[in-house]
Image: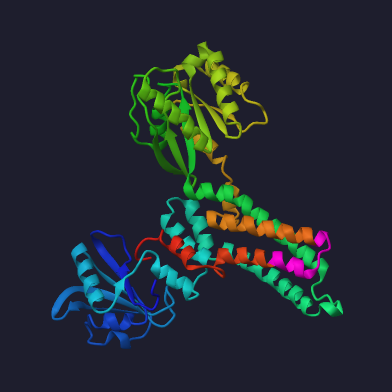
């Protein structure tokens, strides 16, 4: 990207609306907009103070395109760290394009995806992990993912990494200094303090790496597979969870032949529910493909809801025992919720009996649990939602702990930990400072990858290509 260019783009969502915002950034931003803006008070825009608003007309020669409100940000006191102007105009798609075209004719070029945030990174307004959090914040669609993105954008994660990197860098400098006085056998880096630092870094890295399992599912939504026999009420349960008629409900067995997915937020956490084809023996080729896909979705899910027809279980409990055991054997590490449906057909005594029988099918030390519901009436659905929340480490969110959500950061943390463990092995073996310095430099490199002290054009291109235009 040519970062010296003055760029312009629509900063609000494309399409018609009440108001649209066009952002212009670069060394010539004020000159360009001044040439097409006529203030109501007659003042020249580029001569005005930074962080001020001005009402006037956007013109193309003598033709007035629109009446607009213009914000100016001079010097480095802007989002991008360079002169920036934002034009708030009426939200007509025609007006938006007319203003952009006149700006392009005056010397701007169209901004590429994420180029404004890229310039903010290059100009030191934020580090790379904070820049990536901007995209996560825009994409957040529930309270959990929003909280994580906000924490990262405010620098919670990068500050922790930067502090560890600086402490390690200080010791690395002392060890490198020792190499210059190798013949005099001096020791500038206190080995006991160095050992304590390596232990501290190891603990922090392991905590951050472990947090990825929680952070990633909160960011992307937790996939929950709804499985069971045909006509057991899986689609009815999906509709009850979503509170809308999302899936077709029919008395005909085998109605759902493909997976249906939708997402809702429960307690601020996104859950992606997958209604699968009923599991049974069948000669129908299409239904058979749906059942095959069901097992694929179970393997991808974080939680499995196994729905059971309470009427049928009452008379044939042994059949369900085999199917439940089959799923537990095939997916032993997945939380399994045994959901007895159609409980509105049974009395209280029958419900208790079924609950006891199902409870006997799951080991005490497993992640499995039993719930009684009626998807048709909605009874027990709220309890099911509460149970799903218990599978998520919401305590980490409540305590505002740092959670890693980015796979690039996760990979760099793993590599940094590997190098730190090599340093620890070197200390234990009594290796000389020059050998320790090699692994320390590698660890510093991987720390730098996260915050952007170490980067390249290809990496930046991959990161910012996923941004929207105008951000």
Q: Is residue 100 left or right of residue 207?
A: left
Is residue 434 found inside the magenta-colored segment of the image? yes
Is residue 23 at all visible to an observer of this figure?
Answer: no
Residue 80 appears at what percent x and percent y?
42, 74
Number of numbered callouts drawn: 0
Residue segment shown in magenta: 427-440
Quick one: quadrant of the N terminus?
A: bottom left
For residue 161, which quarter of the picture?
bottom right
Which residue shows up at 20% across the image and 74% down it?
A: 67
Work out whether residue 375 or residue 235 is closer to the camera in this orientation and state it: 235
Residue at the limit of the structure toward the front, as seen here? 183
Residue 165 painted magenta = no
Q: Where is residue 17 in the image (x, y as percent from the top left)?
A: 24, 60
Image coordinates for residue 85, horizontal then vertical, percent: 33, 76
Residue at the spot x=33%, y=33% of the render?
Answer: 245
Q: Can residue 334 be seen in this view?
A: yes
**Does 235 appear above or below 31?**
above
Identity of the residue drawn at 43% across and 63% down: 464
The prevailing secondary structure element of the residues shown in magenta is helix
Residue at image coords 68%, 71%: 169
């Amino acid at each position: 990207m040519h970062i010296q260019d003055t760029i312009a783009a629509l900063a609000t969502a494309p399409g018609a609306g009440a108001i649209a915002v066009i952002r212009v950034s670069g060394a010539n931003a004020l000159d360009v907009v001044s040439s097409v803006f006529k203030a109501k008070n007659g003042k020249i825009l580029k001569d005005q103070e930074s962080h001020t608003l001005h009402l006037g007309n956007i013109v193309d020669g003598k033709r007035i395109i629109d009446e607009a409100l213009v914000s100016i940000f001079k010097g480095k006191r802007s989002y991008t760290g360079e002169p920036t102007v934002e034009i708030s105009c009426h939200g007509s798609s025609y007006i938006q394009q007319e203003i952009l075209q006149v700006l392009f004719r005056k010397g701007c070029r169209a901004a590429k995806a994420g180029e404004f945030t890229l310039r903010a990174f290059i100009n030191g307004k934020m580090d790379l992990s904070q820049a990536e959090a901007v995209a996560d914040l825009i994409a957040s669609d529930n309270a959990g993912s929003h909280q994580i993105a906000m924490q990262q954008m405010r620098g919670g994660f990068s500050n922790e990494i930067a502090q560890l990197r600086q402490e390690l860098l200080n010791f690395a400098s002392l060890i490198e200094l020792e190499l210059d006085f190798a013949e005099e056998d001096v020791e500038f880096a206190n080995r006991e303090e160095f050992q304590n630092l390596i232990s501290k870094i190891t603990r922090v890295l392991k905590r951050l790496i472990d947090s990825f399992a929680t952070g990633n599912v909160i960011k992307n939504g937790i996939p929950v597979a709804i499985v069971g026999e045909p006509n057991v009420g899986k689609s009815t349960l999906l509709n009850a969870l979503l509170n809308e008629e999302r899936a077709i409900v029919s008395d005909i067995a085998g109605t759902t032949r493909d997976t249906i997915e939708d997402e809702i937020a429960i307690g601020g956490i996104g859950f992606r529910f997958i209604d699968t084809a009923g599991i049974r023996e069948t000669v129908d080729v299409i239904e058979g493909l749906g059942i095959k896909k069901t097992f694929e979705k179970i393997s991808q899910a974080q939680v499995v809801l196994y729905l059971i027809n309470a009427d049928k279980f009452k008379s044939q409990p042994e059949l369900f025992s085999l199917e439940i055991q089959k799923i537990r054997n095939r997916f032993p590490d997945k939380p399994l919720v045994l959901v007895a449906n159609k409980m509105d057909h049974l009395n209280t005594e029958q419900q208790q009996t079924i609950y006891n029988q199902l409870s006997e099918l799951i080991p005490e030390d497993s992640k499995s649990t039993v719930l009684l519901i009626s998807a048709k009436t909605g009874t027990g659905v709220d309890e099911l939602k509460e149970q799903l929340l218990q599978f998520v480490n919401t305590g980490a969110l409540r305590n505002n702990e740092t959670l890693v959500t980015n796979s690039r950061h996760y990979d760099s943390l793993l590599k940094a930990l590997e190098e730190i463990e090599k340093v620890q092995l070197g200390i234990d073996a009594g290796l000389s400072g020059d050998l320790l310095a090699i692994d320390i430099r590698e660890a510093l490199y991987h720390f730098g990858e996260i915050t952007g002290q170490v980067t390249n054009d290809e990496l930046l291109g991959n990161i910012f290509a996923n941004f929207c235009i105008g951000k």
